[in-house]
Image (cartoon, rainbow, N blue to C red):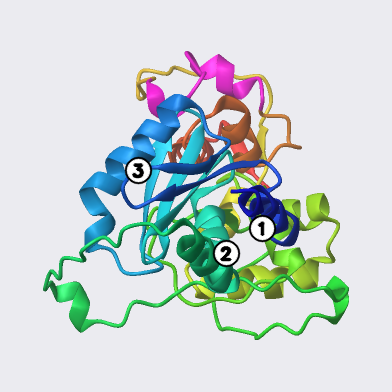
Amino acid sequence: MAETPKLIERVKREVTMLSRSRIALLASNGQIIYSELTGELENLAKDELTRSFRYWGIGDYFVKHYGRENLIVGKVSDNLALVISSVEKTGLLILAFTTIEKKFKDSFKEVENKLKIPKTEKVRVKTAMEKRQVEKTILEPSSRPSREAKVEVFEVSLSPWTVLEPPTSTQISTVTMDRDMIMLLRLVDGWKTVEDLSKEAGIPLDIAIQKLSYLLSKGVVKSKYDEPIYQKKPKLLGKVKVEAVFMSFGAALGKARSLDDILKLVDGKRTILEIARELNARPEVLKRLFENLERRKILELK
């Protein structure tokens, strides 16, 4: 069907965060109508459709991590499924899928009618989920400059040194995002602070705090390491010999195999969080270590 590639091209053009994504459109029976996916990903999508399609309502989806990519398979009409494969974060893919499902529902219905796909019998399953209203995620990229975007202010604990990470749950509440929020969300990696995100995105810190606070309140991102202690800079108190018998080294301390591996990064300039990032260690473990060393008068936390 000649119109389908044009529709996918339009989808990618209008939903800009799909620039690094591959898309497929499948019929409920597994027939491939259009695909940019590899054979393995196509088979994964078909398997999921076989298991789940007749139980889904329009807008329902399934998310799977595959290699370096995330795969989302979702129902966009009575007999069509959209598949997106991307290196983008899961939360961003969910936002993209729900946007497409809302914005292009008439186009998908038109494709379905032209193809005359046999209707799949829907199986009604009564679950506890039916008793709750499932909130849909709606993404509306703003064409206005970022400084003009009006953002609600929410009372959430968010400071310049707060670290943000994507949520593990795929249940995200209703949220409208502008281009700045999309840019900030793409940079969230579980290590960068709000200030880091502001600098990398080229967005003023006060505006970044407002917009990230909004995303935090909606469950699109999670906060961690937001205590000021993680921004303190350990500094050695002279040359001292440290006995490391009180600690063990393992995965929690990342690349560090000895106390020296950690102390050589202690220069009074790096923060606890920066040292943890460099070692790929858990910040809370390093924090406890440095607090222990401070009590022993080996270093100070400035």
Residue at the spot 53% in from the left edge and 53% down from the top edge? 93
Helix or strand or loop: what does disc 1 sit on? Answer: helix
- Report which residue position mark 2 lands on: 100
User: Can residue 126 be seen?
Assistant: yes
Q: Quadrant of residue 201?
A: bottom right
Please rate how many residues cluster around mark 1, counting C-alpha atoms within 10 Å: few if below 14, some from 14 to 19, many from 20: some
Residue contact between numbered discs 2 and 1, judged by CB atoms under 8 Å: yes
Q: Is residue 147 magenta?
A: no
Please rate how many residues cluster around mark 3, counting C-alpha atoms within 10 Å: few if below 14, some from 14 to 19, many from 20: some
- Which stretch did the figure color magenta? 250-265
Q: Which mark is residue 11?
A: 1
Residue at the spot 60% in from the left edge and 75% down from the top edge? 214
Q: Is residue 36 left or right of residue 270?
A: left
Q: Is residue 139 left or right of residue 220?
A: right
Helix or strand or loop: what does disc 3 sit on? Answer: loop
* Mark 3 → mark 1, Cα distance in angstroms: 21 Å
Q: Quadrant of residue 267?
A: top right
**Circle 3: residue type:** Gly
Residue 244 location (% of width, % of height): 42, 18
Q: Which mark is residue 30?
A: 3
